[in-house]
Amino acid sequence: NNAPAFVLGVPLAAKVAGPLGFLGLASQINSAINLLVASRNAIILAEPTLSTRSGGKASFLAGGEVPVISSGSLGSTDVEYKEFGILLEIEPIVGHDNTIFAKITTESSAIDPDRPGGGNTPPGFITRRTSTDVRMKDGETLVMSGLIDRKLSENVTKLPFLGDLPIIGAFFRNTVTDNDDNDLVIFVTPTVIENDVVSQHNQNLIDKRRKMIDSFKKSTGQEDLILD
């Protein structure tokens, strides 16, 4: 079975609506990921840490922006920037028992090679998007997959002149077809942070920053340095 849960060697604990997913067993998941990366069967694209309040939204984009030119009023030209790449959006709501209800949206987009655009012609985009609602416990890991990028390429090698001959030219040509499938897998592990923990976390960051400033002052001799 090529389902991600079986490829990773982790039991399927729970399914969620939309893409295939399962919860929990973070240590086994990390071990499986490290094994896949070591065997060059997987690449870690990003490891972001996001924060938001209950009822808010957190988002992450691994990609870039491309300028899209459009005609405005009175013959003017407007330039807008279209994001592309891998987008993750999370809208969590925390229950009284720290149960987390979240809407998670994932998107993978790229410029369509058949419609690259140019001049006043906007480029086309190939977009795959999925959205799902989940219920999780604090510290559990959700795995989402199903955004498959399938590329079919054909490479032809031939002998000069002979490979171009009709009928018999096929004997002097070699055609290799490559079917490359890439499955984007996203791991989400939420952590509920209480107000007192947040305050302590902020204080730790302030103390760390003060130590960095003091160290910089001593090394440069700039005792009157002020950083906002």
Image: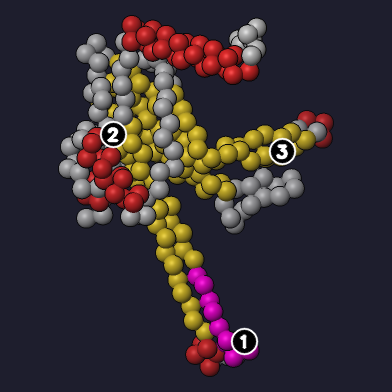
User: What secondary structure is found at the residue carrying circle 2?
Assistant: strand
Q: Earlier in the sequence, mark 3 or mark 2?
A: 3
Cα separation, mark 1 vs mark 3, equals: 46 Å
Mark found first going from the N terminus, 1 or 2: 2
Q: Left of 178 or right of it: where is 12?
A: left
The residue singled out by tag 2 in the image is: 142
Residue 11, image x and y in percent? 17, 43
Task: Classify residue 41 by image quadrant.
Answer: bottom left
Among the 4 quarters of the image, the one containing residue 13: top left
Secondary structure under tag 1 reads loop
Kindly identify which residue carries mark 1: 160
**Nearest to the observer: residue 39 or residue 78:** 39
Horizontally, residue 134 falls left or right of residue 127, namely: left
Marks 3 and 2, Cα distance to the nearest angstrom? Answer: 40 Å
Q: Which amino acid type is shown beneath numbered disc 3? A: Ser
Residue under the point 67% across and 45% down: 122
To which quarter of the image does residue 82 belong? Answer: top right
In the image, residue 85 lies in the stretch drawn in magenta:
no
Image coordinates of residue 144 in percent, x first then y, are 32, 39
Residue found at x 71% / y 50%: 118
Question: Is the residue marked by circle 3 packed among few (<14), some (14-19), or many (20+) residues within 10 Å?
Answer: few
Q: Which residue is mark 3?
A: 70
Taking depth in this image into account, of 210 and 119 the one nearest to the observer is 210
In percent of the image, x 63 and y 89: which residue is there? 161
Q: Which residues are magenta?
A: 154-163
